[in-house]
Amino acid sequence: MKIRRETECRRQNEGRRSAIRGFQLIEALVYIAVIFVVLGAGYEALYRCMDSSITLRRNADDIASALHAGERWRADVRLASRQIRVEQTPSEQIVHLEGPRGEVAYRFATNAVLRRVGDAPWVRLLPSVKSSVMEADPRRQVTAWRWELELKPRQQANMKPGRVRPLFTFIAVPEGSPSQ
């Protein structure tokens, strides 16, 4: 009798142990699933940040290029010794600046700003330009020139547009500017 009772007690204890092992296995599977969900969300956030960082760097490069182009334009306008001429057609605008080094021309066509010195070929100064207008801005005693420039913002195909609208205004006065 005593042996039967011990055998029954062992069977009951083994049943409890297997039930506890079953619960531990289910808990481990749940923890693994939760870890996969958290890691998946973390990787998604990481890749979004990387894409945003790349877009931001490209936009910063475009802004730096626009600032360099604006400073070059201002230097050319300051050196202009004769009247600045503007040719306006429906598809493009060309601004001619006569200076001591010869003629420098700026052209906005097909979403790009191009620059030419003398009779050399046109060189692309800024790609991806949304709009560009160079015009005289008469003041009290001088005629300043203003360049309104808007770049096309770069963005990834699956991302929403950026928060920065790249607009620039450059103002320059030719050294020999006629008084009004």
Image (cartoon, rainbow, N blue to C red):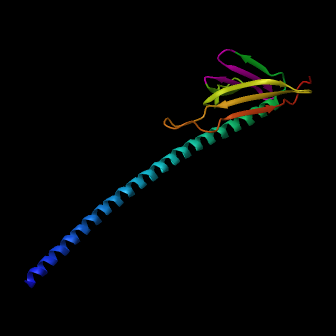
Is 119 a magenta residue? no
Is 102 a magenta residue? yes
Q: Is residue 41 left or right of residue 121?
A: left
Of all residues, the one furthest to the left in this rendering is 1
Asked whether residue 60 is in view, the answer is: yes
Of all residues, the one furthest to the top in this rendering is 90
**x and y percentages locating residue 64 in the rendered image:** 67, 40
Residue that appears at 29% across and 61% down = 26
Residue that appears at 72% across and 24% down = 133
Q: Is residue 122 left or right of residue 52?
A: right
Range of residues picked out in magenta: 89-110
Asked whether residue 105 is in view, the answer is: no
What type of secondary structure mainly makes up the magenta span? Answer: strand
The quarter of the displayed image where residue 146 is located: top right
Asked if 4 appears above or below 20 in the picture, the reply is below
The quarter of the displayed image where residue 164 is located: top right
Using the image as rendered, state which of residue 40 and residue 6 is in the foreground. Answer: 6
Asked if 57 appears above or below 111 in the picture, the reply is below
**x and y percentages locating residue 96 in the rendered image:** 75, 22
